[in-house]
Amino acid sequence: MKKIKKGVHWIWLGLIVALWYWAPWEKEQVIETFPSVSARQGNLKITLDLIGELDSLQHDFVTSTFHGQIDFLASEGMVQENDLLIRLSKESIEEKLENAQENLDTANYNLQNAMESIGLQRVQSENNVELAESRLVDAEASHNRRQVEVEEGLRPAVDLESTAFSLLQAEQGVEESRLSLQTKESQWALEIRQKELQVVRREEEVLRYEEELGATEIFAHRDGLVVHVESWYGSWRKPKEGDNISPNRSVLDFPDISTFLVMVKISERDVHKVKEGQPVEISVDALPGQLFTGVVQSISQLATSDMGTGSITFSAQGESKGFRAEILLDPPTLALSTQDSEAIPTPSSDENPCGLPPFVMERMKERGMDPATADCDALSSGRRGERGGGGERSEESSSPIEASSMGGRMRGESPNELDRVSGGLRPGMTALSRILIQEVVDVVVLPRSAVFLLDGQTVGYKVVKEGWIRVGFSLGAVGPQEAEVAQGAVAGERFLIVSPEEDATSTAPDGTEASSPSPSSPMGGGGSRRMPRGRRDH
Protein backbone atom coordinates (compact mmCIF):
# COMPACT_ATOMS: atom_id res chain seq x y z
CA MET A 1 0.00 0.00 0.00
CA LYS A 2 2.86 2.43 0.78
CA LYS A 3 4.41 1.72 -2.59
CA ILE A 4 1.10 2.48 -4.30
CA LYS A 5 0.75 5.79 -2.44
CA LYS A 6 4.34 6.65 -3.26
CA GLY A 7 3.67 5.93 -6.96
CA VAL A 8 0.60 8.14 -6.99
CA HIS A 9 2.66 10.90 -5.35
CA TRP A 10 5.27 10.75 -8.10
CA ILE A 11 2.54 10.78 -10.75
CA TRP A 12 1.02 13.98 -9.30
CA LEU A 13 4.48 15.53 -9.04
CA GLY A 14 5.11 14.70 -12.69
CA LEU A 15 1.82 16.29 -13.74
CA ILE A 16 2.63 19.46 -11.78
CA VAL A 17 6.06 19.70 -13.40
CA ALA A 18 4.51 19.18 -16.84
CA LEU A 19 1.91 21.87 -16.25
CA TRP A 20 4.65 24.19 -14.98
CA TYR A 21 6.59 23.85 -18.23
CA TRP A 22 3.62 23.78 -20.60
CA ALA A 23 1.57 26.68 -19.12
CA PRO A 24 3.87 29.52 -20.37
CA TRP A 25 3.89 27.96 -23.85
CA GLU A 26 0.10 27.80 -23.78
CA LYS A 27 -0.06 31.46 -22.76
CA GLU A 28 2.26 32.35 -25.62
CA GLN A 29 -0.11 30.50 -27.94
CA VAL A 30 -2.98 32.55 -26.52
CA ILE A 31 -1.14 35.79 -27.23
CA GLU A 32 -0.26 34.74 -30.76
CA THR A 33 -3.75 33.43 -31.55
CA PHE A 34 -6.13 35.93 -30.00
CA PRO A 35 -6.23 39.70 -30.64
CA SER A 36 -5.49 42.46 -28.18
CA VAL A 37 -5.87 46.23 -28.01
CA SER A 38 -3.77 49.04 -26.61
CA ALA A 39 -4.83 51.41 -23.89
CA ARG A 40 -4.63 55.02 -25.05
CA GLN A 41 -4.24 58.37 -23.37
CA GLY A 42 -6.74 60.91 -24.61
CA ASN A 43 -10.30 62.17 -24.47
CA LEU A 44 -13.34 59.93 -24.06
CA LYS A 45 -16.60 61.01 -25.61
CA ILE A 46 -19.71 59.56 -24.04
CA THR A 47 -22.30 59.45 -26.80
CA LEU A 48 -25.76 58.12 -27.37
CA ASP A 49 -25.92 56.45 -30.78
CA LEU A 50 -29.35 56.09 -32.36
CA ILE A 51 -30.27 54.58 -35.68
CA GLY A 52 -32.97 56.45 -37.55
CA GLU A 53 -34.39 57.35 -40.92
CA LEU A 54 -34.13 60.52 -42.95
CA ASP A 55 -37.29 62.43 -43.73
CA SER A 56 -37.89 65.76 -45.43
CA LEU A 57 -38.85 68.69 -43.25
CA GLN A 58 -41.63 69.72 -45.64
CA HIS A 59 -43.84 67.78 -48.05
CA ASP A 60 -46.15 68.74 -50.93
CA PHE A 61 -48.69 65.97 -51.42
CA VAL A 62 -50.48 65.32 -54.71
CA THR A 63 -54.10 64.20 -54.33
CA SER A 64 -57.06 63.55 -56.60
CA THR A 65 -60.30 65.51 -56.18
CA PHE A 66 -62.53 62.61 -57.22
CA HIS A 67 -62.77 58.85 -57.39
CA GLY A 68 -60.88 57.32 -60.29
CA GLN A 69 -58.72 54.49 -61.56
CA ILE A 70 -55.03 55.04 -62.25
CA ASP A 71 -54.18 54.45 -65.92
CA PHE A 72 -50.67 55.93 -65.72
CA LEU A 73 -48.39 56.62 -62.75
CA ALA A 74 -45.01 58.30 -63.07
CA SER A 75 -42.03 56.46 -61.63
CA GLU A 76 -40.34 57.70 -58.49
CA GLY A 77 -37.49 60.07 -59.21
CA MET A 78 -36.71 63.56 -60.44
CA VAL A 79 -39.36 65.30 -62.55
CA GLN A 80 -39.61 68.67 -64.21
CA GLU A 81 -42.42 71.17 -64.02
CA ASN A 82 -45.42 70.17 -66.20
CA ASP A 83 -44.29 66.52 -66.47
CA LEU A 84 -47.24 64.11 -66.46
CA LEU A 85 -47.53 62.45 -63.03
CA ILE A 86 -50.93 60.71 -63.00
CA ARG A 87 -53.54 59.94 -65.63
CA LEU A 88 -56.88 58.56 -64.45
CA SER A 89 -59.32 56.52 -66.53
CA LYS A 90 -61.76 58.70 -68.53
CA GLU A 91 -64.36 56.05 -69.39
CA SER A 92 -66.47 56.24 -66.25
CA ILE A 93 -66.23 60.04 -66.13
CA GLU A 94 -67.31 60.37 -69.77
CA GLU A 95 -70.30 58.15 -69.06
CA LYS A 96 -71.22 60.24 -66.02
CA LEU A 97 -70.80 63.42 -68.05
CA GLU A 98 -73.14 62.09 -70.75
CA ASN A 99 -75.80 61.23 -68.16
CA ALA A 100 -75.38 64.61 -66.51
CA GLN A 101 -75.85 66.39 -69.83
CA GLU A 102 -79.04 64.43 -70.48
CA ASN A 103 -80.31 65.36 -67.01
CA LEU A 104 -79.51 69.01 -67.75
CA ASP A 105 -81.45 68.90 -71.01
CA THR A 106 -84.41 67.38 -69.18
CA ALA A 107 -84.25 70.05 -66.47
CA ASN A 108 -84.19 72.81 -69.08
CA TYR A 109 -87.17 71.24 -70.86
CA ASN A 110 -89.12 71.02 -67.59
CA LEU A 111 -88.33 74.66 -66.83
CA GLN A 112 -89.48 75.80 -70.26
CA ASN A 113 -92.65 73.70 -69.98
CA ALA A 114 -93.43 75.13 -66.56
CA MET A 115 -92.93 78.69 -67.75
CA GLU A 116 -95.27 78.17 -70.71
CA SER A 117 -97.92 76.49 -68.55
CA ILE A 118 -97.73 79.23 -65.95
CA GLY A 119 -98.02 81.84 -68.68
CA LEU A 120 -101.34 80.34 -69.84
CA GLN A 121 -102.63 80.10 -66.27
CA ARG A 122 -101.63 83.71 -65.61
CA VAL A 123 -103.58 84.93 -68.65
CA GLN A 124 -106.65 83.03 -67.49
CA SER A 125 -106.38 84.39 -63.95
CA GLU A 126 -105.90 87.93 -65.20
CA ASN A 127 -108.99 87.52 -67.41
CA ASN A 128 -110.94 86.40 -64.35
CA VAL A 129 -109.89 89.56 -62.53
CA GLU A 130 -110.92 91.70 -65.48
CA LEU A 131 -114.29 89.94 -65.66
CA ALA A 132 -114.89 90.47 -61.92
CA GLU A 133 -113.98 94.12 -62.24
CA SER A 134 -116.40 94.49 -65.21
CA ARG A 135 -119.18 92.92 -63.15
CA LEU A 136 -118.41 95.32 -60.35
CA VAL A 137 -118.77 98.27 -62.70
CA ASP A 138 -122.15 96.97 -63.89
CA ALA A 139 -123.31 96.38 -60.29
CA GLU A 140 -122.32 99.90 -59.29
CA ALA A 141 -124.18 101.39 -62.24
CA SER A 142 -127.33 99.33 -61.52
CA HIS A 143 -127.26 100.30 -57.84
CA ASN A 144 -126.89 103.98 -58.68
CA ARG A 145 -129.88 103.92 -61.06
CA ARG A 146 -132.03 102.15 -58.50
CA GLN A 147 -131.07 104.67 -55.88
CA VAL A 148 -132.20 107.55 -58.14
CA GLU A 149 -135.46 105.81 -58.86
CA VAL A 150 -136.13 105.32 -55.12
CA GLU A 151 -135.31 108.94 -54.41
CA GLU A 152 -137.74 110.08 -57.16
CA GLY A 153 -140.42 107.77 -55.72
CA LEU A 154 -140.56 105.63 -58.78
CA ARG A 155 -139.62 102.53 -56.75
CA PRO A 156 -140.09 101.55 -53.17
CA ALA A 157 -137.05 101.71 -50.84
CA VAL A 158 -137.06 97.95 -50.48
CA ASP A 159 -135.96 97.55 -54.11
CA LEU A 160 -132.69 99.34 -53.27
CA GLU A 161 -131.59 96.48 -51.03
CA SER A 162 -131.39 93.97 -53.90
CA THR A 163 -129.03 96.17 -55.96
CA ALA A 164 -126.93 96.87 -52.85
CA PHE A 165 -126.57 93.11 -52.31
CA SER A 166 -125.54 92.58 -55.95
CA LEU A 167 -122.96 95.36 -55.58
CA LEU A 168 -121.49 93.68 -52.49
CA GLN A 169 -121.20 90.36 -54.33
CA ALA A 170 -119.43 92.03 -57.24
CA GLU A 171 -116.94 93.70 -54.88
CA GLN A 172 -116.21 90.33 -53.19
CA GLY A 173 -115.75 88.72 -56.62
CA VAL A 174 -113.09 91.28 -57.56
CA GLU A 175 -111.30 90.84 -54.25
CA GLU A 176 -111.32 87.04 -54.54
CA SER A 177 -110.07 87.03 -58.13
CA ARG A 178 -107.25 89.43 -57.29
CA LEU A 179 -106.28 87.38 -54.21
CA SER A 180 -106.38 84.21 -56.29
CA LEU A 181 -104.02 85.77 -58.82
CA GLN A 182 -101.59 86.83 -56.09
CA THR A 183 -101.62 83.35 -54.55
CA LYS A 184 -101.03 81.72 -57.90
CA GLU A 185 -98.22 84.19 -58.64
CA SER A 186 -96.42 83.03 -55.46
CA GLN A 187 -96.95 79.39 -56.36
CA TRP A 188 -95.77 79.96 -59.88
CA ALA A 189 -92.68 81.80 -58.68
CA LEU A 190 -91.85 78.92 -56.31
CA GLU A 191 -92.34 76.36 -59.07
CA ILE A 192 -90.15 78.35 -61.47
CA ARG A 193 -87.47 78.73 -58.74
CA GLN A 194 -87.45 74.98 -58.13
CA LYS A 195 -87.12 74.30 -61.83
CA GLU A 196 -84.32 76.87 -62.12
CA LEU A 197 -82.47 75.35 -59.14
CA GLN A 198 -82.79 71.94 -60.73
CA VAL A 199 -81.21 73.36 -63.87
CA VAL A 200 -78.41 74.97 -61.82
CA ARG A 201 -77.72 71.66 -60.05
CA ARG A 202 -77.60 69.85 -63.35
CA GLU A 203 -75.29 72.53 -64.78
CA GLU A 204 -72.99 72.19 -61.76
CA GLU A 205 -72.99 68.43 -62.19
CA VAL A 206 -72.03 68.78 -65.85
CA LEU A 207 -69.35 71.32 -64.92
CA ARG A 208 -67.96 69.01 -62.21
CA TYR A 209 -67.64 66.10 -64.59
CA GLU A 210 -66.11 68.35 -67.21
CA GLU A 211 -63.56 69.49 -64.62
CA GLU A 212 -62.93 65.90 -63.60
CA LEU A 213 -62.44 64.99 -67.22
CA GLY A 214 -59.91 67.78 -67.49
CA ALA A 215 -58.30 66.74 -64.19
CA THR A 216 -57.70 63.14 -65.19
CA GLU A 217 -54.18 64.25 -66.01
CA ILE A 218 -52.14 65.70 -63.14
CA PHE A 219 -48.89 67.49 -63.95
CA ALA A 220 -45.91 68.43 -61.81
CA HIS A 221 -46.31 71.89 -60.30
CA ARG A 222 -42.53 72.33 -59.99
CA ASP A 223 -39.21 70.61 -60.55
CA GLY A 224 -38.26 68.17 -57.83
CA LEU A 225 -38.22 64.66 -56.46
CA VAL A 226 -41.47 62.72 -56.61
CA VAL A 227 -42.20 59.77 -54.31
CA HIS A 228 -45.11 57.31 -54.21
CA VAL A 229 -47.05 57.52 -50.93
CA GLU A 230 -47.97 54.31 -49.15
CA SER A 231 -51.66 53.86 -48.38
CA TRP A 232 -54.33 51.18 -48.12
CA TYR A 233 -55.03 49.41 -51.42
CA GLY A 234 -56.28 46.13 -50.00
CA SER A 235 -52.92 46.03 -48.22
CA TRP A 236 -50.54 48.70 -47.01
CA ARG A 237 -48.37 49.49 -50.02
CA LYS A 238 -47.51 52.09 -52.62
CA PRO A 239 -49.95 52.82 -55.46
CA LYS A 240 -49.66 51.25 -58.89
CA GLU A 241 -51.45 51.47 -62.21
CA GLY A 242 -54.94 49.97 -62.02
CA ASP A 243 -55.57 51.05 -58.42
CA ASN A 244 -58.70 53.01 -57.53
CA ILE A 245 -58.13 56.20 -55.58
CA SER A 246 -60.55 58.29 -53.56
CA PRO A 247 -60.76 62.07 -53.17
CA ASN A 248 -58.14 63.74 -50.96
CA ARG A 249 -56.02 60.58 -50.70
CA SER A 250 -52.32 61.40 -51.09
CA VAL A 251 -50.86 59.51 -54.03
CA LEU A 252 -47.56 61.30 -54.63
CA ASP A 253 -45.24 63.36 -52.48
CA PHE A 254 -42.90 66.18 -53.45
CA PRO A 255 -40.50 66.18 -50.45
CA ASP A 256 -38.31 69.20 -49.89
CA ILE A 257 -34.86 67.69 -50.42
CA SER A 258 -33.00 70.76 -49.19
CA THR A 259 -33.85 70.29 -45.48
CA PHE A 260 -33.94 66.95 -43.66
CA LEU A 261 -34.87 65.46 -40.31
CA VAL A 262 -33.65 62.24 -38.75
CA MET A 263 -36.51 60.41 -37.06
CA VAL A 264 -35.19 58.38 -34.11
CA LYS A 265 -36.51 56.57 -31.06
CA ILE A 266 -34.93 57.25 -27.67
CA SER A 267 -35.33 54.51 -25.08
CA GLU A 268 -36.95 55.25 -21.76
CA ARG A 269 -33.65 54.77 -19.91
CA ASP A 270 -31.83 57.32 -22.11
CA VAL A 271 -34.43 60.04 -22.67
CA HIS A 272 -33.31 62.02 -19.61
CA LYS A 273 -29.84 62.34 -21.18
CA VAL A 274 -31.07 64.16 -24.27
CA LYS A 275 -32.27 67.76 -24.42
CA GLU A 276 -33.63 69.85 -27.26
CA GLY A 277 -30.88 71.90 -28.86
CA GLN A 278 -28.10 69.35 -28.22
CA PRO A 279 -25.62 69.09 -31.12
CA VAL A 280 -25.60 65.87 -33.10
CA GLU A 281 -23.21 64.27 -35.59
CA ILE A 282 -24.93 62.23 -38.28
CA SER A 283 -23.47 59.66 -40.63
CA VAL A 284 -25.53 58.19 -43.45
CA ASP A 285 -24.95 54.59 -44.48
CA ALA A 286 -25.35 55.38 -48.17
CA LEU A 287 -22.73 58.17 -47.97
CA PRO A 288 -19.67 56.67 -46.26
CA GLY A 289 -16.97 59.17 -45.47
CA GLN A 290 -19.34 62.10 -44.93
CA LEU A 291 -20.30 63.58 -41.59
CA PHE A 292 -23.36 65.80 -41.19
CA THR A 293 -24.23 68.00 -38.24
CA GLY A 294 -27.54 68.90 -36.67
CA VAL A 295 -29.43 69.56 -33.46
CA VAL A 296 -32.14 67.80 -31.50
CA GLN A 297 -35.24 69.71 -32.58
CA SER A 298 -38.01 68.00 -30.61
CA ILE A 299 -38.67 65.10 -28.23
CA SER A 300 -42.15 63.72 -27.72
CA GLN A 301 -43.64 64.04 -24.26
CA LEU A 302 -45.06 60.51 -24.17
CA ALA A 303 -43.39 57.16 -24.68
CA THR A 304 -45.05 54.91 -27.21
CA SER A 305 -44.29 51.76 -29.13
CA ASP A 306 -45.94 53.29 -32.21
CA MET A 307 -43.48 55.71 -33.78
CA GLY A 308 -46.04 57.02 -36.27
CA THR A 309 -44.23 55.67 -39.31
CA GLY A 310 -44.41 52.56 -41.41
CA SER A 311 -40.69 52.57 -42.12
CA ILE A 312 -38.63 49.41 -41.96
CA THR A 313 -36.11 51.14 -39.72
CA PHE A 314 -38.56 51.80 -36.90
CA SER A 315 -40.19 48.40 -37.29
CA ALA A 316 -36.79 46.79 -36.86
CA GLN A 317 -36.34 48.54 -33.52
CA GLY A 318 -38.72 46.18 -31.83
CA GLU A 319 -41.87 46.67 -29.81
CA SER A 320 -40.22 48.34 -26.82
CA LYS A 321 -41.51 51.77 -25.92
CA GLY A 322 -39.55 54.87 -26.76
CA PHE A 323 -39.76 58.61 -27.23
CA ARG A 324 -40.05 59.87 -30.77
CA ALA A 325 -37.43 62.52 -31.49
CA GLU A 326 -36.61 64.66 -34.49
CA ILE A 327 -33.08 65.75 -35.31
CA LEU A 328 -32.82 68.70 -37.72
CA LEU A 329 -29.85 68.48 -40.06
CA ASP A 330 -27.89 71.56 -40.97
CA PRO A 331 -28.15 72.37 -44.69
CA PRO A 332 -26.39 69.64 -46.72
CA THR A 333 -23.99 72.19 -48.17
CA LEU A 334 -22.53 72.50 -44.66
CA ALA A 335 -21.95 68.78 -44.32
CA LEU A 336 -18.40 68.03 -43.19
CA SER A 337 -16.22 65.86 -45.35
CA THR A 338 -14.03 63.40 -43.55
CA GLN A 339 -11.03 65.64 -44.21
CA ASP A 340 -12.73 68.34 -42.14
CA SER A 341 -13.45 66.06 -39.20
CA GLU A 342 -10.65 65.23 -36.79
CA ALA A 343 -12.74 62.46 -35.29
CA ILE A 344 -13.25 60.63 -38.56
CA PRO A 345 -10.16 60.53 -40.83
CA THR A 346 -10.58 59.68 -44.48
CA PRO A 347 -9.30 56.22 -45.42
CA SER A 348 -7.95 55.54 -48.89
CA SER A 349 -9.68 53.04 -51.18
CA ASP A 350 -6.81 50.59 -50.64
CA GLU A 351 -7.25 50.81 -46.89
CA ASN A 352 -11.04 50.58 -47.10
CA PRO A 353 -12.10 48.39 -50.06
CA CYS A 354 -15.46 47.60 -48.38
CA GLY A 355 -16.47 51.26 -47.99
CA LEU A 356 -16.79 51.02 -44.20
CA PRO A 357 -17.47 54.09 -42.06
CA PRO A 358 -14.25 55.41 -40.46
CA PHE A 359 -15.29 54.67 -36.87
CA VAL A 360 -15.97 51.03 -37.85
CA MET A 361 -12.43 50.82 -39.25
CA GLU A 362 -11.07 52.24 -36.00
CA ARG A 363 -12.83 49.54 -34.00
CA MET A 364 -11.63 46.80 -36.33
CA LYS A 365 -8.04 48.00 -35.96
CA GLU A 366 -8.41 48.17 -32.18
CA ARG A 367 -9.48 44.53 -32.27
CA GLY A 368 -6.50 43.50 -34.35
CA MET A 369 -8.48 43.24 -37.61
CA ASP A 370 -7.25 44.69 -40.90
CA PRO A 371 -10.03 46.46 -42.89
CA ALA A 372 -7.91 46.23 -46.05
CA THR A 373 -8.14 42.43 -46.02
CA ALA A 374 -11.71 42.16 -44.70
CA ASP A 375 -14.25 39.89 -46.39
CA CYS A 376 -16.66 42.44 -47.92
CA ASP A 377 -19.32 39.83 -48.70
CA ALA A 378 -19.31 38.62 -45.11
CA LEU A 379 -19.49 42.18 -43.81
CA SER A 380 -22.39 42.96 -46.13
CA SER A 381 -24.22 39.85 -44.95
CA GLY A 382 -23.58 40.83 -41.36
CA ARG A 383 -24.90 44.32 -41.97
CA ARG A 384 -28.12 42.99 -43.41
CA GLY A 385 -28.52 40.90 -40.29
CA GLU A 386 -28.01 43.93 -38.06
CA ARG A 387 -31.11 45.62 -39.41
CA GLY A 388 -33.27 43.18 -37.55
CA GLY A 389 -31.75 44.24 -34.22
CA GLY A 390 -32.67 46.72 -31.54
CA GLY A 391 -33.40 50.40 -31.66
CA GLU A 392 -29.98 51.61 -30.48
CA ARG A 393 -26.94 51.05 -32.57
CA SER A 394 -23.39 51.16 -31.28
CA GLU A 395 -20.26 52.39 -33.03
CA GLU A 396 -18.86 48.94 -33.57
CA SER A 397 -22.04 47.61 -35.13
CA SER A 398 -22.41 50.66 -37.35
CA SER A 399 -21.59 50.01 -40.98
CA PRO A 400 -23.05 50.94 -44.37
CA ILE A 401 -26.27 49.16 -45.19
CA GLU A 402 -28.34 49.18 -48.32
CA ALA A 403 -30.49 52.29 -48.54
CA SER A 404 -34.26 52.06 -48.61
CA SER A 405 -36.19 52.33 -51.85
CA MET A 406 -35.49 56.04 -51.85
CA GLY A 407 -31.77 55.61 -51.35
CA GLY A 408 -30.69 54.30 -54.72
CA ARG A 409 -30.81 55.70 -58.23
CA MET A 410 -34.34 56.06 -59.55
CA ARG A 411 -35.50 56.04 -63.14
CA GLY A 412 -35.58 59.46 -64.72
CA GLU A 413 -33.36 60.93 -62.01
CA SER A 414 -30.58 63.39 -62.66
CA PRO A 415 -28.10 62.53 -59.89
CA ASN A 416 -26.03 65.68 -60.31
CA GLU A 417 -29.07 67.93 -60.07
CA LEU A 418 -30.53 65.99 -57.14
CA ASP A 419 -27.24 65.84 -55.24
CA ARG A 420 -26.68 69.54 -55.82
CA VAL A 421 -29.85 70.29 -53.88
CA SER A 422 -29.83 67.49 -51.30
CA GLY A 423 -26.13 66.96 -50.73
CA GLY A 424 -26.61 63.31 -51.73
CA LEU A 425 -29.30 62.72 -49.11
CA ARG A 426 -32.62 61.04 -49.85
CA PRO A 427 -35.75 60.57 -47.76
CA GLY A 428 -35.77 57.08 -46.29
CA MET A 429 -32.00 56.67 -46.00
CA THR A 430 -30.71 55.04 -42.83
CA ALA A 431 -28.71 57.38 -40.60
CA LEU A 432 -26.72 57.00 -37.39
CA SER A 433 -27.13 59.96 -35.04
CA ARG A 434 -24.44 60.42 -32.42
CA ILE A 435 -25.46 62.72 -29.57
CA LEU A 436 -22.60 63.91 -27.35
CA ILE A 437 -23.61 63.41 -23.71
CA GLN A 438 -20.26 63.96 -21.93
CA GLU A 439 -16.56 64.33 -22.73
CA VAL A 440 -13.78 63.28 -20.30
CA VAL A 441 -10.40 64.88 -21.04
CA ASP A 442 -6.90 63.33 -20.87
CA VAL A 443 -7.64 59.92 -19.36
CA VAL A 444 -6.59 56.31 -20.02
CA VAL A 445 -9.13 54.71 -22.32
CA LEU A 446 -9.78 51.06 -23.19
CA PRO A 447 -12.39 49.50 -25.45
CA ARG A 448 -15.04 47.77 -23.37
CA SER A 449 -14.24 44.57 -25.25
CA ALA A 450 -11.04 44.46 -23.14
CA VAL A 451 -12.92 44.95 -19.85
CA PHE A 452 -14.42 41.91 -18.10
CA LEU A 453 -16.38 41.05 -14.99
CA LEU A 454 -15.08 38.26 -12.75
CA ASP A 455 -16.54 37.46 -9.35
CA GLY A 456 -18.10 40.92 -9.15
CA GLN A 457 -14.83 42.67 -9.95
CA THR A 458 -13.83 44.58 -13.10
CA VAL A 459 -10.70 43.06 -14.57
CA GLY A 460 -8.58 42.97 -17.70
CA TYR A 461 -5.94 40.62 -19.10
CA LYS A 462 -2.72 42.49 -19.74
CA VAL A 463 -0.33 41.12 -22.32
CA VAL A 464 3.15 40.48 -20.86
CA LYS A 465 6.25 38.77 -22.20
CA GLU A 466 5.37 35.48 -20.53
CA GLY A 467 1.74 35.59 -21.77
CA TRP A 468 -0.95 37.39 -19.81
CA ILE A 469 -1.77 38.43 -16.28
CA ARG A 470 -5.10 39.41 -14.79
CA VAL A 471 -5.27 42.96 -13.39
CA GLY A 472 -8.06 44.73 -11.56
CA PHE A 473 -9.60 47.88 -13.01
CA SER A 474 -11.13 50.92 -11.38
CA LEU A 475 -13.36 52.52 -13.99
CA GLY A 476 -14.43 56.13 -14.40
CA ALA A 477 -16.75 57.26 -17.18
CA VAL A 478 -18.18 54.45 -19.30
CA GLY A 479 -19.35 54.95 -22.87
CA PRO A 480 -21.14 52.63 -25.30
CA GLN A 481 -17.85 51.27 -26.66
CA GLU A 482 -15.03 52.59 -24.47
CA ALA A 483 -14.40 53.08 -20.77
CA GLU A 484 -12.11 55.28 -18.70
CA VAL A 485 -9.66 53.20 -16.67
CA ALA A 486 -8.83 55.26 -13.58
CA GLN A 487 -6.56 52.56 -12.13
CA GLY A 488 -5.10 49.36 -13.52
CA ALA A 489 -3.90 50.38 -16.98
CA VAL A 490 -1.31 52.69 -18.51
CA ALA A 491 -1.36 54.12 -22.01
CA GLY A 492 0.46 51.80 -24.40
CA GLU A 493 -0.21 48.58 -22.49
CA ARG A 494 -2.03 45.90 -24.45
CA PHE A 495 -4.98 43.88 -23.20
CA LEU A 496 -6.74 40.81 -24.56
CA ILE A 497 -10.23 41.32 -25.94
CA VAL A 498 -11.18 37.65 -25.40
CA SER A 499 -11.19 36.28 -21.88
CA PRO A 500 -8.71 33.44 -21.22
CA GLU A 501 -10.83 32.48 -18.20
CA GLU A 502 -14.19 30.86 -18.76
CA ASP A 503 -15.79 32.52 -15.72
CA ALA A 504 -15.10 36.07 -16.92
CA THR A 505 -17.87 38.02 -18.64
CA SER A 506 -17.21 40.59 -21.34
CA THR A 507 -18.68 44.07 -20.96
CA ALA A 508 -18.77 44.63 -24.74
CA PRO A 509 -22.35 45.75 -25.50
CA ASP A 510 -22.64 44.54 -29.09
CA GLY A 511 -21.78 40.91 -28.56
CA THR A 512 -19.18 40.76 -31.33
CA GLU A 513 -16.66 39.38 -28.87
CA ALA A 514 -19.26 38.11 -26.47
CA SER A 515 -22.59 36.45 -26.36
CA SER A 516 -25.86 38.28 -25.79
CA PRO A 517 -25.75 40.95 -23.07
CA SER A 518 -26.60 39.72 -19.62
CA PRO A 519 -29.31 41.74 -17.85
CA SER A 520 -27.59 41.18 -14.53
CA SER A 521 -24.31 42.65 -15.69
CA PRO A 522 -23.75 46.21 -14.44
CA MET A 523 -21.86 47.00 -17.63
CA GLY A 524 -24.46 45.46 -19.93
CA GLY A 525 -22.05 42.75 -21.12
CA GLY A 526 -22.57 39.10 -21.85
CA GLY A 527 -20.65 35.85 -21.70
CA SER A 528 -17.17 35.52 -23.16
CA ARG A 529 -15.58 33.08 -25.55
CA ARG A 530 -13.46 30.48 -23.84
CA MET A 531 -9.73 30.25 -24.42
CA PRO A 532 -7.18 27.65 -23.37
CA ARG A 533 -6.62 27.98 -19.68
CA GLY A 534 -3.23 29.15 -18.54
CA ARG A 535 -1.72 29.97 -15.20
CA ARG A 536 -3.55 32.79 -13.51
CA ASP A 537 -1.03 35.41 -12.43
CA HIS A 538 -2.32 38.27 -10.30
Image (cartoon, rainbow, N blue to C red):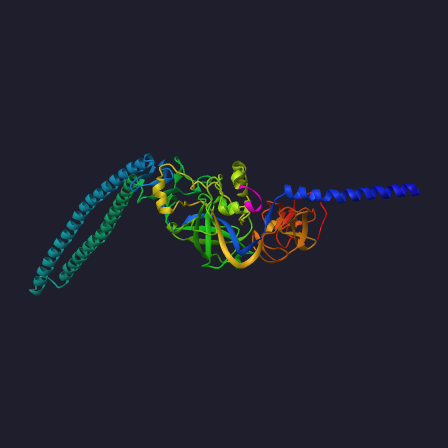
> What residue lies at 71% left-to-right and 51% top-to-bottom?
537
Q: Residue furthest right?
A: 1
> What residue lies at 8% left-to-right and 65% top-to-bottom?
151
Residue 471 image point, x, y percent: 67, 54
Q: How many marks?
A: 0
> What residue lies at 48% left-to-right and 56% top-to-bottom?
300
> What residue lies at 9% left-to-right and 61% top-to-bottom?
144
Residue 466 image point, x, y percent: 68, 47
Left or right, 426 with respect to 1, comes to left
Q: Nearer the viewer, residue 102 or 150?
A: 102
Q: Is 215 in the magenta?
A: no
State whether residue 386 appears in this view.
Answer: yes
Q: What secondary structure is the magenta-colored segment mainly?
A: loop
Q: Residue furthest left?
A: 152
Left or right, 199 with respect to 441, comes to left
Residue 77 image point, x, y percent: 37, 40
| Region rendered in magenta | 365-370
